[in-house]
Image: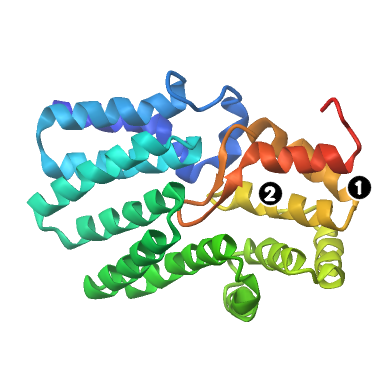
Amino acid sequence: HPELYQYVELLRPALSIFHVYDRMAEYHEPRFAGQPLYEAFHQACRLADDSVDPTQRVLAHWAGAFACADAGDRNRLEEHARILRVCAGRTGIASHRWFTAHVDALAAMFAGDLDVLEAAVASYLAVGIEVGYEADTIAQWAPMMITVAQFRGTFATLIPSIESARAENPGLPVYAPTLAWALAIEGDLAAARTMLHEARVSDFHLPMDLTWLIGQSFWMEVAHRVDDQDAVAVVLDRIEPWGHLMTCCHTGIAGVGWHYVGRGRFTLRDVDG
């Protein structure tokens, strides 16, 4: 099917958002509307819409929703969520319901209504278990709940769970900065400082995947709160090129990147920066 091949070719460069973060240096231009990487997703969405194939539309708009989350484009994200609900209802495919519930939860994070967000996150968990994706769903539901706790101001209740997640998931090193971030926000600066110093040994290394930007931003927040200028200087150099993006791992958000860049500049007493 030539039209499907064209759709895949349009989507291919945009997939680097998900899988090839070590190529980020190739894309220093902002990923907002009109820029190559961000727009590649939406070209794919338009092509899928033209095909009138609900399955193609689900896959394209699912990917497009994540691109919008990275760019902080709430209006377009909500439009992708609306289209997903319609198309998933037409296909009746279990995974499409799961994709839709995921994007609904992501859209709710941007909308700012905490009751709606909690309901959307609960719905995502229920749908994932119902369609047989329990393990993957729980892995993604956990950072959603961290986002809820962040917005609710109830981090203290989740710190034991984050500690357990870190111990049980050595392949997800992002739980270390997540835990340090939660501790710092809850005022345990001594514990947060200890974790920051431990991470300094590995130069705050994190894999270049979906968690890289949010994890580095968490280290920045910790370094800012404990006033560690050396750590700030290291992390700031990494995250500043991506200040225009949301700190988003597609299952949780922690604000716009410029917030963390500003934290770093403030810590370094760089008023102009």
Could you classify mark 1 by the number of other residues whose Cα lies within 10 Å: few (under 14), some (14-19), or many (20 or more)? few
User: Looking at numbered disc 1 in the image, what kind of residue is underneath it?
Assistant: Asp
Q: Position of residue 140 (x, y in %)?
A: 44, 64
Marker disc for residue 82: none
**Taking 111 as reference, is 40 above or below it?**
above
Q: Position of residue 124 (x, y in %)?
A: 32, 65
Q: Which of 251/27 is in front?
A: 251
Which residue does the numbered mark 1 point to in the structure image? 230
- Horizontally, is 45 left or right of 54 in the view? right
Identified at 23% across, 26% down, the residue is 46
Identified at 57% across, 73% down, the residue is 169
Q: Quadrant of the N terminus?
A: top left
Q: Would residue 26 be visible to someone looking at this image?
A: yes
- Horizontally, is 265 left or right of 87 in the view? right
Say which element carries label 1.
Answer: helix
- Whichever of callouts 2 and 1 sits on the residue coming sooner in the sequence is 2
Q: Position of residue 65 (x, y in %)?
A: 36, 42
**Taking 69 as reference, is 114 above or below it?**
below
What is the distance, in whole Å, between disc 2 and disc 1 at their CAs? 15 Å
Identified at 80% across, 71% down, the residue is 188
Q: Residue 239: which quarter of the image?
A: top right
- Horizontally, is 220 left or right of 127 in the view? right
Could you classify mark 2 by the number of other residues whose Cα lies within 10 Å: few (under 14), some (14-19), or many (20 or more)? many
Q: Residue 76: which quarter of the image?
A: top left
Identified at 62% across, 46% down, the residue is 213
User: Looking at numbered disc 2 in the image, what kind of residue is underneath it?
Assistant: Ser
Which residue does the numbered mark 2 point to in the structure image? 217
Q: Position of residue 111 (x, y in %)?
A: 42, 48
- Horizontally, is 224 left or right of 64 in the view? right
